[in-house]
Image: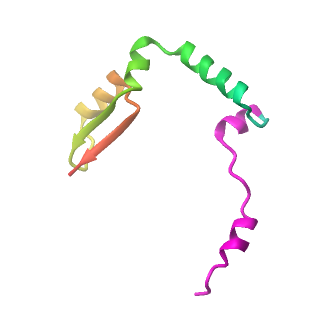
Amino acid sequence: MNPIDIKTDIKQRKPKISKIEKLRGKKLTKSNKQAFVNRLLSKMSIEQKVGQCLVLGFSGNTVTPETIRKIHEYQPAGLACGV
């Protein structure tokens, strides 16, 4: 296996483009990022906004129907599982 020249590897990579930029077809500035966030938040209910402040935790490595129900009910920002 050949060693990788990090400088060459970095130069050959294309910069990542976010999903928002792909959808918009233009580079996002601070002002149109803020406009995007404002539009998104205006479409969310208060329950959805509160849910985005939560991380739902569960034990084990299998998602149960109860966990799925809680995901749909609370719409959390993330999931944390422990074994």
Q: Looking at the image, how many numbered discs can be counted on the residues?
A: 0
| Region rendered in magenta | 1-24
Give coordinates of residue 20: x percent, y percent.
Answer: 67, 35
Give coordinates of residue 6: x percent, y percent.
Answer: 65, 73
Q: Is residue 32 above or below residue 23?
A: above
* Residue under the point 26% across and 34% down: 67
Q: Name the quadrant containing residue 64.
A: top left
Q: Is residue 6 magenta?
A: yes
Q: Is residue 35 magenta?
A: no
* Residue under the point 67% across and 78% down: 5
Of residue 70 and residue 14, the one placed in the foreground of this image is 14
Give coordinates of residue 3: x percent, y percent.
Answer: 61, 84
* Residue under the point 72% across and 25% down: 31
Horizontally, is 74 left or right of 33 in the view? left
Of residue 66 and residue 9, the one placed in the foreground of this image is 9
Give coordinates of residue 48: x percent, y percent.
Answer: 42, 19
Horizontally, is 53 left or right of 17 in the view? left
Horizontally, is 54 left or right of 59 in the view? right
